[in-house]
Amino acid sequence: MSSTASGKNDTWRNWGGTVTARPVREVMPASVEELSAAVARAAEDGLKVKAVGTGHSFTSIAATDGVLIRPQLLTGIRNIDRDAGTVTVEAGTPLKRLNMALAREGLSLSNMGDIMEQTVSGATSTGTHGTGRESASIAAQIKALELVTADGSVLTCSEKENPEVFAAARIGLGALGIVTAITFAVEPIFLLTAREEPMSFDRVTSTFDELWAENEHFEFYWFPHTGNTNTKRNNRSAGPERPVGQLKGWFEDEFLSNGVFQVANWVGRAAPATIPAIAQISSKALSARTYTDIPYKVFTSPRRVRFVEMEYAVPREAVVETLRELKAMVDRSRLRISFPVEVRTAPADDITLSTASGRDTAYIAVHMFQGTPYQAYFTAAERIFTAHEGRPHWGKVHSRDAEYFARAYPRFGEFTALRDRLDPERRFQNDYLRRVLGS
């Protein structure tokens, strides 16, 4: 068997530094057959199995003390079908490589999240999304899936083939099997014009419905301890291409958004009392700018400052009220928050456990700089989010359990019944799935 199985008991850590795990062994299969064999062998040894991507989840969704599958060798594009408008890609392919490869072929996904470090299977399995009036999460752009199930067999699903698996497995949390390939809908590459500009919190919240309705992709960042936000509107454009200049791009995206921001967070961590003053400066640091480029260069940006994050999906009509409550809570608390709060939207989709399942959705994400105590802030924010029937992002910090999700998701029972069928022995179980899905 040519897959590299290491017997050494290394510690695995996630990107945010919130989770560690010590698997019994790690396997890096070079083919679907090798992956099937690794799952079968784990079953013989009575071990649980988990596939891990780049560790960008803040929850322990990928942690295991059994067999850890690393998909680095399961990468690349299998097939591009221009007539059908699809691309089939191996599960371990980083989104960055997919985006760049598609661009070379004159193609693009319709929408994407704001970073592209994750693997395609890790990003979709946890419900990664960007912002969009009509265009939804990355998983909602899936047309077919291939996965290795608990008995080692390979199952393909789409709207026509195994539709009940397709409904759930697009955001499968790693609970139904190990995804080995994904077929995405793609379209001819297009240009987006981004318009970034500062706006007051009061103006954004009072005109939110118009801002949402007038733009294909609207999002904003509110800086706690201030009445300031940065807004971003992305809309399709006939061109011409006008990318951000190299020096200006470096200054704003690297120096200000990563370099100076990193230092400001170090200062804030050492001396929390300085945070409100720093926030006033940070929130005014980025000036208005407009640029036009291909989608992945507009939607995504580098994130080098490490943080911990909680994000909740609330019904879109509840977002302004939820935000105002969040601001009031921060204003009257003794909390010192150095990271902006991010607000995005998604249309309703038909994926069983998607945070946007069955309802038009807005996302509110709260962040804390890595290494600062985040529990008090996240707990207070979570209390507000859950009061508005919030659904937490599967890959970000939250304290909810299966009992909560059974109420939050009308089709929750559909997912757990499918899991009982596909993984009766709980081969893909871990502590996190036991908590959020029940045992």
Image (cartoon, grey):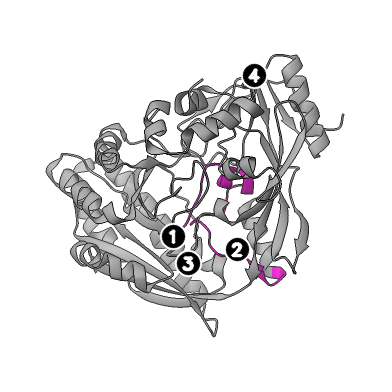
- Residue placed at 22% from the left, 43% from the top? 336
Q: Which of marks 3 and 4 is in front?
A: 4
Q: What stretch is highlighted in magenta?
A: 104-130
Main SS, magenta region, reads: loop
Q: Is 63 displayed left or right of 132 in the figure?
A: right
Amino acid identity at mark 1: Thr
Q: Tell me the quarter of the picture where residue 40 sits.
A: top right
CA gap between label 3 and label 1 equals: 24 Å
| Residue 299 x, y percent position in the rendering | 50, 64
Circle 4 packing at 10 Å, graded few (<14), some (14-19), many (20+), is: some
Q: Residue 42 carries which label?
A: none
Task: Kindly state the secondary structure of the residue where label 1 is placed.
Answer: loop
Task: Kindly state the secondary structure of the residue where label 4 is placed.
Answer: loop
Residue 30 seen anywhere in this rendered image of the structure: no
Task: Kindly state the secondary structure of the residue where label 3 is placed.
Answer: helix
Q: Tell me the quarter of the picture where residue 54 sits.
A: top right
Amino acid identity at mark 4: Glu
Residue with the mark numbered 4? 425
Q: Which is nearer the eye, 121 or 403?
A: 403
Residue with the mark numbered 2? 109
Q: How many labels does the image show?
A: 4
CA gap between label 2 and label 1 equals: 13 Å
Residue with the mark numbered 1? 131
Residue with the mark numbered 3? 250
